[in-house]
Amino acid sequence: MGMKALLRRQGTSVTSSLGKLPDYKVYVLSVRQKWACLLASGIGLYCIGYVFFHSFWFALVMTGGAAFIPKYWSQYLLSRRRDALSLNFKQALYSLSSSLVAGRSVENGFRDAIEDLRLLYPGGDNDLMMELGIICTRLEYGQPIEVALQDFSDRAGSEDIGNFADVFTTCKRSGGDLVEIIRRTSAIISEKLEISQEIGVMIAQKRFESKVMMVSPLFFLVFMDMSSPDYMSPMHSGIGLVISAVALLVFALCAWLMMKIMDIKV
């Protein structure tokens, strides 16, 4: 912890000159994204409320839940962003390892990694390419590379990137074998990502089935309302509204449980 604190203090001046750097622990929705999320979720909740209660006012009350949806949507987008960052980091480590084996310095290896990523992603940048550019800029300012890596790991909030930065810093200061460390780190991260992808493939069908199960009760209610409105009318007044409310709560609980079961982390 003492070494990390020292590295943070050393990098403060350069960080301030670079401006505010991205924080991968949070995802702030743009105004357009937030309004689009509120509109889409509001319409969806209104439709669900009307299907269950057949009441304009009850359905309107349901739309109030749309205020909580942007939070979960931002978490979903953050998860996707961090997954992409980890995948690109693995590819960058392969490039860095190849550069070190070829006898290039660590600093030049990071510069070469940017060009290699450009070959993999032509016509567009990604978060890791930007971060490697920031690291190279810090090197031009004369900042030690381990300081730049520690700052990146602090903002990334990734276990893989954090472990690599810690090991790299210790090895750089104690004179360890950087080539072997980077090679083994890239192999471990690659194995972890491959296991995660294999799990994703195995449960892809189950995820699709869970989505079908979540929407099938809504289609069933719509079908019953259209085919037998007299049969369903008692559910839209008196004690039927209470039963519909309980059914809606059970439906929401089951949907939440299915999403939790399908959310497997490696």
Image (cartoon, rainbow, N blue to C red):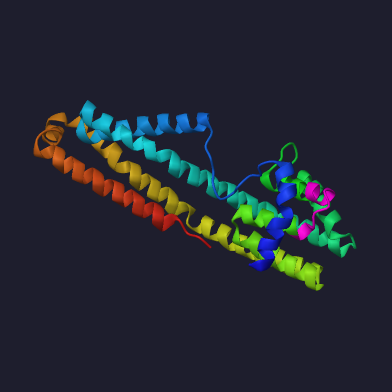
Residue positioned 58% across, 63% down in the render: 195
User: Which picture quadrant has residue 167?
Assistant: bottom right
Residue 34 versus residue 180 in the image, above or below = above
Q: On the picture, is 248 further left or further right than 31?
A: left
User: Which picture quadrant has residue 40?
Assistant: top left
The extreme left residue here reads 238
Is 178 covered by the magenta stretch?
A: no
The extreme top residue here reads 56
Q: On the picture, is 168 further left or further right than 219?
A: right
Residue 7 versus residue 245 in the image, above or below = below
Residue positioned 43% across, 55% down in the render: 262
Q: On the picture, is 185 further left or further right than 38?
A: right
Front residue of 110/83: it is: 110
Is 138 covered by the magenta stretch?
A: yes
User: Which picture quadrant has residue 65?
Assistant: top left
In which quadrant of the rendered image does the N terminus lie? Answer: bottom right
Q: Main secondary structure of the magenta part?
A: helix
Residue 87 versus residue 174 in the image, above or below = above
Residue positioned 83% across, 52% down in the render: 142
Front residue of 16/198: it is: 16
| Span highlighted in magenta in the image | 136-146
Front residue of 98/205: it is: 98
x, y percent for residue 154: 63, 56
Q: Is residue 180 visible?
A: no
